């Protein structure tokens, strides 16, 4: 029953439905035409004997490999592996699974399907070779040039210049056997065909003229930079080694592959487009609103002491700088954050901060949006902006020699954005499109209902983070400029530069860019967020309706904010209730089989927050799920965590804390936000000791107070 709920969730997800439609249309014989999860009618026929037979055929030591990367004693690891896996005996199994050869596609294949959505989602695909083929480095660079970023041809042409798509991209899907070259676009229904035609024209132009030297060099740098980023974390290194081994049996495949990409020529790209992007061998699929289908090896240095080297500097205008040299990989992350985000919104201006952030990395007074994108991607870098619950930020990631450029561009985005009216209108359209996409996701709809129930419709945290269609459509340049001038000031911000830097040089570059040009101002949104008094809780469930197959149950509680004394206990409760060994998960999903998705999460604000238990189930089982979930929450209130789950949650939380500090990028954002919100940049160093010091009775006391029925709101989202 649990897996049946997973089938239903996949059928509600437009991206998954589109992907399945593409693969079953493009492939006639290859197993890729079948969904990874399988087919529901076949699944319903499975017996325990089928599962046992599969297990005994496949789960054999000669069909197993293990990758362990990190700060370990290798001899000890070998002993443990031998102790636990050595007793496994080799089993009889078929050693050579024969994968059918995919016949050459003769003719265009096109399928358009209706789906309850407001946007059209489309994909065009062509067959390409497997990952070991010599053309694959060429095809990956071709995908990058065509649709791999904001300076790519598809983005600049179809999205920015023609305004035909909300998003458009290209990528090469390259498994161990035959793959696909895919162009993907999200559009308004009436623009779908025009967007697809423009995308094809862009590829034909690439075939006719070939890429420029600048485009090819940009794609090469992006490939190199992406590989460096995979090596920053232990998980990334392990994943890289594992993928190399299972796909090619060559642990150095990624290194060899990246070297091959650096040898690709302009002529190689031109030849590849002409060879693979054929009009008579393409597959076109789309999902559309009803009645809108229309026509057709890394350093092993210890990471434990990195934080000891953080240098904190305060400029005369009040701006705080955090600097950390880390030369393990030649990457640098710049993260500039300011208090604001959702805190800056009112019901009339909901979505203003995300919209402003969309504009900051577009046109500046020095450069057009296209020039910014081309410049960043030409050095293999990235630049972005975002808005969260309590902050907004602009960030850039580059390789070591390009730090001056990163600081210049971050400064331009914050201090000299053009806020171009034409770009504003276009980005409003894109944000409204993302709101429509949120409306297609049941969990998002239910969570918005819960936020309003807990905080009220006038409180910033009760508003939809991306705004409403009406509020975003009404936003003009003046309130955006006012918000920028109020938010981006010295005393309201922190800039962190972490990575392969000389700290003194980085400090001097930041002083030159920000000390004079950035006004001092004052800390914004430092008191309780604006809004009406919180609504009363503990009443009847809120009933919401949609046209999807699954039902969502949320049980939420209003809690304390970021600095509440119960913060550590709430975080540990979140950890304990979120994993696949939690009592809630085991009871509802494993024992009763009532749901696929079960867990908990938090929204942590400055003065308040929420803690929510969630379940995705079927409409028929919603009442039973609610009864069982409330019983489990009540048991948690009365008894707290059992000894075993208490210790497991501690270990899991501490492990995540360590892994979350592996990369300079992760550490830069965490320390900057903690410093900005008053916790201190080194707050993360205090967290492990705080968690270790928690006792079970402290957890129980927090649960008893925080999860009382009087502080509760229940939201039920089900089919109309």
Image (tube, rainbow, N blue to C red):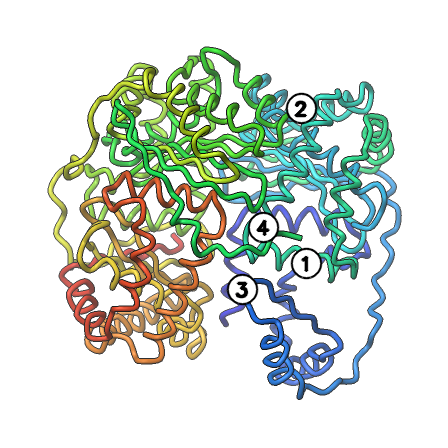
* Residue bearing the label numbered 2: 153
Q: Name the front one of labels 3 and 4.
A: 3
Question: Marks 3 and 2, Cα distance to the nearest angstrom?
Answer: 43 Å
Q: Is residue 127 left or right of residue 593?
A: right
Residue 17, given in percent of the width and then of the height, sits at 59, 50
Would residue 352 be seen by someone viewing this image from the given angle? yes
- Residue at 82%, 69% in the rendered image: 97
Instruction: Answer whether labels 2 and 4 touch (C-beta < 8 Å).
Output: no
* Residue bearing the label numbered 4: 16
Would residue 428 be seen by someone viewing this image from the given angle? no
- Residue at 73%, 56% in the rendered image: 32
* Residue bearing the label numbered 3: 71
Q: Which one is earlier in the sequence, the residue at label 3 or at label 4?
A: 4
Quick one: SS at disc 2?
helix
Q: Name the front one of labels 3 and 2.
A: 3
Question: Marks 4 and 1, Cα distance to the nearest angstrom?
Answer: 27 Å
Q: How crowded is the residue under tag 1: few (<14 C-alpha within 10 Å), some, or many (20+)?
A: many
Residue 569, given in percent of the width and then of the height, sits at 25, 64
| Res. 241 mark | 1
Q: Which one is earlier in the sequence, the residue at label 3 or at label 2?
A: 3
- Residue at 80%, 41% in the rendered image: 260
Q: How crowded is the residue under tag 2: few (<14 C-alpha within 10 Å), some, or many (20+)?
A: many
Question: Marks 2 and 4, Cα distance to the nearest angstrom?
Answer: 26 Å
Relative depth, front residue between 378 and 64: 378
Relative depth, front residue between 320 and 695: 320
Q: Which image quarter: residue 681? A: top left
Question: Marks 1 and 2, Cα distance to the nearest angstrom?
Answer: 32 Å
Quick one: SS at disc 4?
helix
Q: Which one is earlier in the sequence, the residue at label 4 or at label 1?
A: 4
Quick one: SS at disc 3?
loop
């Amino acid at each position: 029953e649990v897996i049946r709920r997973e089938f239903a969730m996949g059928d509600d997800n437009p991206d998954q439905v589109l992907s399945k439609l593409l693969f079953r249309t493009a492939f006639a014989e290859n197993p890729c035409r079948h969904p990874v999860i399988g087919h529901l009618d076949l699944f319903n026929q499975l017996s325990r004997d089928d599962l046992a037979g599969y297990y005994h055929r496949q789960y054999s030591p000669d069909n197993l490999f293990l990758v362990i990367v990190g700060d370990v004693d290798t001899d000890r690891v070998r002993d443990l592996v031998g102790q636990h896996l050595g007793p496994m005996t080799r089993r009889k199994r078929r050693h050579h699974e024969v994968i059918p050869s995919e016949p050459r596609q003769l003719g265009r294949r096109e399928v358009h399907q209706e789906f309850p959505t407001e946007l059209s989602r489309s994909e065009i695909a062509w067959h390409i070779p497997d990952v070991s083929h010599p053309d694959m480095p060429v095809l990956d660079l071709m995908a990058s040039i065509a649709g791999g970023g904001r300076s790519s041809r598809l983005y600049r042409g179809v999205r920015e210049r023609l305004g035909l798509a909300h998003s458009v991209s290209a990528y090469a899907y390259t498994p161990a056997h035959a793959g696909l070259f895919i162009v993907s676009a999200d559009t308004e229904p009436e623009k779908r065909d025009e967007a697809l035609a423009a995308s094809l024209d862009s590829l034909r132009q690439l075939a006719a003229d070939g890429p420029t030297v600048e485009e090819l060099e940009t794609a090469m740098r992006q490939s190199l930079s992406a590989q460096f980023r995979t090596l920053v974390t232990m998980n990334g290194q392990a994943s890289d080694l594992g993928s190399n081994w299972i796909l090619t049996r060559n642990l150095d495949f990624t290194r060899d592959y990246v070297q091959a990409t650096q040898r690709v020529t302009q002529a190689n790209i031109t030849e590849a487009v002409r060879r693979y992007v054929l009009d008579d061998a393409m597959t076109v699929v789309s999902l559309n609103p009803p009645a809108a289908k229309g026509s057709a090896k890394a350093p092993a240095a210890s990471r434990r002491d990195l934080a000891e080297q953080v240098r904190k500097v305060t400029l005369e205008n009040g701006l705080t700088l955090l600097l950390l040299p880390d030369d393990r990989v030649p990457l640098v992350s710049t993260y500039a954050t300011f208090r604001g985000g959702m805190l800056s919104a009112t019901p009339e201006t909901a979505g203003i901060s995300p919209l402003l952030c969309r504009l900051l990395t577009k046109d500046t007074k020095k450069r057009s949006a296209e020039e910014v994108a081309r410049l960043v991607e030409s050095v293999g870098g990235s630049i972005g902006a975002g808005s969260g619950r309590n902050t907004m930020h602009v960030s850039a990631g580059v390789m070591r020699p390009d730090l001056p450029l990163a600081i210049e561009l971050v400064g331009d985005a914050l201090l000299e954005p053009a806020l171009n009216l034409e770009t504003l209108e276009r980005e409003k359209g894109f944000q409204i499109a993302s709101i429509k996409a949120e409306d297609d996701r049941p969990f998002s709809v239910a969570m918005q209902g819960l936020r309003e129930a807990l905080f009220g419709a006038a409180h910033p945290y009760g508003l939809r983070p991306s705004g409403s269609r009406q509020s975003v459509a009404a936003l003009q340049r003046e309130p955006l400029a006012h918000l920028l001038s109020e938010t981006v000031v010295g005393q309201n911000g922190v800039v962190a530069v972490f990575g392969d830097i000389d700290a003194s040089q980085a400090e001097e570059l930041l002083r030159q860019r920000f000390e004079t040009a950035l006004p001092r101002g004052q800390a914004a949104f430092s008191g309780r967020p604006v809004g009406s008094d919180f609504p009363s809780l503990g009443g009847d469930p809120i009933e919401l309706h949609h046209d999807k197959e699954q039902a969502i149950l949320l049980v939420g509680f209003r809690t304390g904010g970021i600095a509440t004394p119960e913060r550590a206990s709430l975080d540990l409760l979140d950890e304990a209730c979120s994993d696949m060994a939690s009592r809630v998960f085991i009871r509802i999903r494993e024992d009763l089989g009532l749901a696929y998705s079960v867990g908990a999460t938090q929204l942590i604000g400055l003065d308040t927050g929420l803690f929510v238990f969630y379940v995705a189930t079927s409409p028929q089982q919603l009442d039973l799920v609610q009864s069982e979930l409330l019983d489990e929450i009540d048991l948690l209130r009365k008894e707290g965590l059992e000894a075993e789950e208490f210790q497991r949650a501690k270990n899991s939380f501490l492990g995540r804390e360590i892994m979350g500090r592996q990369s300079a990028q992760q550490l830069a954002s965490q320390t900057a936000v903690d410093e900005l919100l008053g916790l201190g940049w080194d707050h993360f160093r205090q967290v492990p000791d705080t968690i270790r010091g928690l006792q079970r009775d402290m957890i129980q006391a927090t649960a008893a107070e925080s999860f009382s029925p009087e502080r509760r709101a229940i939201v039920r989202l089900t089919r109309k």
